[in-house]
Amino acid sequence: MWFQKKIYHPEKIEVKESSLHGRGVFALQSFSKGETIEKAPTILLNAAEKEHLQTTSLFRYYFLVPNDKTSVALGLGYSSLYNHSIPANAEYRMDIKKRIIIIKAAQPIKEGEEITLNYNGTPNDTSPVYFKT
């Protein structure tokens, strides 16, 4: 089963203060392009539950999911703490069936560098995001 495998990699990343916004996720080692940084469990929520999130402090920490039954995923581990950037140096993919989010390096990332995601899904997507940047 997916939950029996180690899917969280705290020895590779850390959370600390970011110049981008509050806290961020930083590399404790270098990552090659395509290398998995983190696989984190998620809590899947439906559209009605998503509406409730908008009135809580969790509003800034979820991922939109293009799925009829699940409209958002709340990422656990460090997954909800990666800051948004265009371009981003990492990318994510949801695996709804396994209920995980997979963060991979979109380009080489150096030790000590902040790891960023483009919340629109691909590293160079310039579409507007759903919040003020």
Image (cartoon, helix red, strand yellow):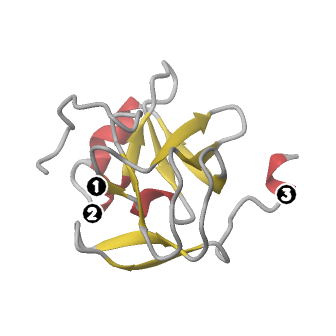
Q: Label 3 near label 2: C-beta < 8 Å?
A: no
Numbered label attached to residue 5: 3
Q: Where is residue 109 in the image (x, y as percent from the top left)?
A: 51, 60
Mark 2 residue element: helix
Please name the amino acid that badge 1 sits on: Arg
Crowding around mark 1 (Cα neighbors within 10 Å: few <14, some 14 to 19, many 20+) is some
Outermost residue, top side: 68
Q: Label 1 near label 3: C-beta < 8 Å?
A: no
Report, in whole angstroms, how far the alpha carbon at label 2 lies from the one at label 3: 30 Å
Crowding around mark 3 (Cα neighbors within 10 Å: few <14, some 14 to 19, many 20+) is few
Crowding around mark 2 (Cα neighbors within 10 Å: few <14, some 14 to 19, many 20+) is few
Mark 1 residue element: helix
**Residue for point 43% across, 30% down:** 71
Looking at the picture, tell me which residue is in the foreground, 114 or 81: 114
The quarter holding residue 61 reads bottom left
Please name the amino acid that badge 3 sits on: Lys
Total residue callouts: 3
Which residue is tagged 2? 57
Is 126 on the left-hand or right-hand side of 7? left
**Residue for point 32% across, 74% down:** 23
Numbered label attached to residue 86: none
Please name the amino acid that badge 2 sits on: Ser
Q: Position of residue 104 (x, y in %)?
A: 58, 48
Q: Label 2 near label 1: C-beta < 8 Å?
A: yes
Report, in whole angstroms, how far the alpha carbon at label 3 lies from the one at label 1: 28 Å
Q: Position of residue 131 (x, y in %)?
A: 16, 45
The quarter holding residue 46 reads top left
Q: Reading the chain from its start, which is encountered first: label 3 or label 1?
A: 3
Outermost residue, left side: 132
**Residue for point 65% across, 42% down:** 99
Which residue is tagged 1? 60
